[in-house]
Amino acid sequence: MHYNNPSFGYGGYCFPKDTKQLKASFTDVPNNIISAIVDANETRKEFIASQILKSNPKVVGIYRLIMKSGSDNFRSSAVQGIIAKFLSENIKIVISNQF
């Protein structure tokens, strides 16, 4: 089940940029699947954030900003948007890379 459960959606440096560029490059060509990929990623992140916010947390713990173990590249981590949403709701964030 973990393979089909993308957590906060996809992130990273290349894939979000590439899917958005594909969508922009083919505005004159019907391409429902490219739009659906980009939209579904945002929907997933919004859904997960709203589910967490329903419990009215004062503090939210985030485990790792990165997807690949051993990496230090979190520039476009999928969880960054979630963190921003929580901070806008004045929720304290605790980030750890150790489980």
Image (cartoon, helix red, strand yellow):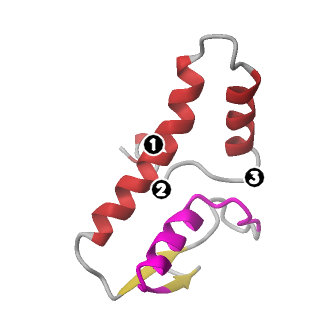
Residue positioned 45% across, 42% down in the render: 3
Residue positioned 61% across, 70% down in the render: 65
Residue extending furthest front? Answer: 28
Q: Nearer the viewer, residue 34 or 67?
A: 34
Q: Nearer the viewer, residue 8 or 99?
A: 8
Look at discs 1 and 2 and give the one toward the viewer: 2
- 65 left or right of 70 in image: left
**Number of disc labels:** 3
- The residue tagged 1 is 3
Q: Which residues are magenta?
A: 73-93
- The residue tagged 3 is 13
Crowding at dot 3, Cα within 10 Å, few <14 / some 14-19 / many 20+, comes out as few
- The residue tagged 2 is 8
Q: What secondary structure is marked by label 2?
A: loop
- Residue 36 in percent (x, y) is at 50, 29
Q: CA gap, disc 1 to disc 3? A: 20 Å
At label 3, the amino acid type is Tyr
- Residue 90 in percent (x, y) is at 43, 86
> Looking at the rendered structure, which numbered label has been put on residue 18?
none
Asked if labels 2 and 3 touch by Cβ distance under 8 angstroms, the answer is no
Q: CA gap, disc 3 to disc 2? A: 15 Å
At label 2, the amino acid type is Phe
Quarter residue 74 falls in: bottom right
